[in-house]
Image (cartoon, helix red, strand yellow):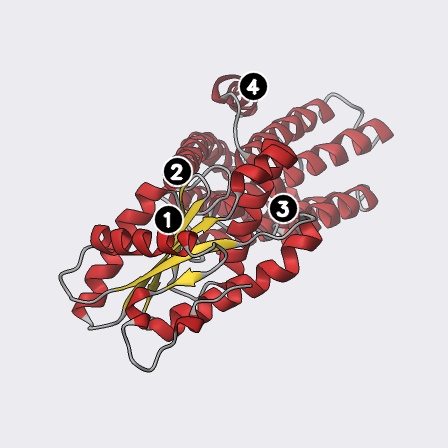
Amino acid sequence: MTLNLLTIAVALPAFMGRVNRPARFAQAGVALQAAGWVLLLLSSLAEPSSWQDRVVSTLSMAGIAAGMAYNAIAFDLWCGRVAFARAPAVIAVLLTAGYGIGFDSYPFRVGWANGLFTLQMAIVVASLCRKPLVPVGRWRWLLVISLLAQMTVTGWRGVLGAFYTADFPNFFAPHMVNLFFGLVANITVVLSLAALLLAHRDEAARELERLATTDGLTGVLNRRAWLTQAAIDLTMGERYRQPVGVLMVDLDHFKQINDHYGHAGGDGALQLFAEALRAVARTGDVYCRYGGEEFCVLMNQADAAAVRAFDLRLRAWLHEAAPRLLGYALPYSAGVAMRLSDDETIEALLRRADSALYSAKALGRNLTLNPDELDEPDIQPSLSMRD
């Protein structure tokens, strides 16, 4: 088992290449566990109960427990959770400290270490059984099965060492529990390796999907992904007879920003605008970087008043944040198109919004124009907002 762990600890970073954060934690966890088992075997070469035995054995417990804590962090990250697995880490510290302090009592140290190892694995199993925050494959059930099997034999060894010491007087005692432990350990090492590789593959697939659907600079949806989602939302709006509006936005005088502040300054302006969209958008609003300095927002369940309110929130946010964060104002022109009939496509809405946008540019920029509102007798042109 130790040779298998060592082989995996060397092979994972060598053949996986550059990996993401959870995979790095998993690699570190395997390496720590392999180091712990090597130290545990080396401790048998020291004089029993000597200070060398105490130091090497305690370090071995630290490596195995810390490896499980690192793996728990990797599992949480692969399941979409950002909070670190604090409980397994705390148990690793307590296990190591208690083992070193109580080393002179064989029943205590065996019961303490194996009992806390069992608790540590139980906490990881409970975390894996929680509903993930991102779509994941069946790899977590491989881990659950492996950890449950390890818990069974580890808890068994702890009970024997603590309460039936004569039947289990040392680590290599020829007892049935060690036969089961050897079988379970070698099987679960293979299963755990398969689970780690599958989890890493899932994460890589999610990252590829994210890169394919989001704009690399601003982090919002790209044009292709937005058009796909917008078509779906329009179909839903038609089914439930809900109003839908499209807001097409173009940053004013963006070339001057690039000329004066450089392309890094232009990138900063685009990123701030994307942050503004995230800050003021309602749940269900879908926005994207349409291209260059153009952005689009599809507003579900939104009438003309809701679109106008969104525009006012966006301008107010930028009015406060842009001078403070960029050192200059960030005005924009925008065109609005409200869905007029159930069979109107997203392409038709975009054409009308684009036409309104260029009319806003022609009228002097820094305003939002909704031609559909201007056709209503109780709506005045002054509703087009100018800073």
* Residue 111 image offset from top left, x and y in percent: 67, 49
Report helix, strand or loop for mark 3. Answer: helix
Relative vertical location of residue 170 with respect to residue 162 in this rendering, above or below: above
User: Which residue is pictured at 33% across the width and 82% down the height?
Assistant: 378
Query: Is residue 174 or residue 142 the one in the foreground?
Result: 142
Question: Which residue type does callout 3 highlight?
Answer: Asn
**Does residue 277 appear to the left or right of 62 in the view shown?**
left
| Secondary structure under the numbered disc 4 in the rendered image | helix
| Whether label 4 touches label 2, CB < 8 Å | no
- Provide the residue designation for mark 4: 10
Q: Residue extending furthest left?
A: 343
User: Is label 1 or label 3 in front?
Assistant: 1
Taking the image as shown, residue 113 lies to the left or right of residue 377, namely right
Residue at horizontal 53 percent and vertical 51 percent from the top: 273
What residue is shown with label 1?
Answer: 135
Name the element at disc 2.
helix
Which x, y percent locates residue 331?
Answer: 54, 54
- Residue type for callout 4: Val
Real-space Cα separation, disc 4 to disc 3, in angstroms: 27 Å
Q: Are marks 2 and 1 in contact (CB under 8 Å)?
A: yes
Disc sitting over residue 202 in the figure: 2
Mark 2 or mark 1, earlier in chain: 1
Q: Which mark is residue 114?
A: 3
Looking at the picture, does residue 161 appear above or below residue 373? above
Of badges 4 and 3, nearer the viewer stands: 4
| Residue located at (80% from left, 25% from top) | 47
Mark 1 surroundings within 10 Å by alpha-carbon count, few (fewer than 14), some (14 through 19), many (20 or more): few
Amino acid type for the residue under numbered disc 1: Pro
Q: Earlier in the sequence, mark 1 or mark 4?
A: 4
The part of the image, by quadrant, that contains residue 199 is top left
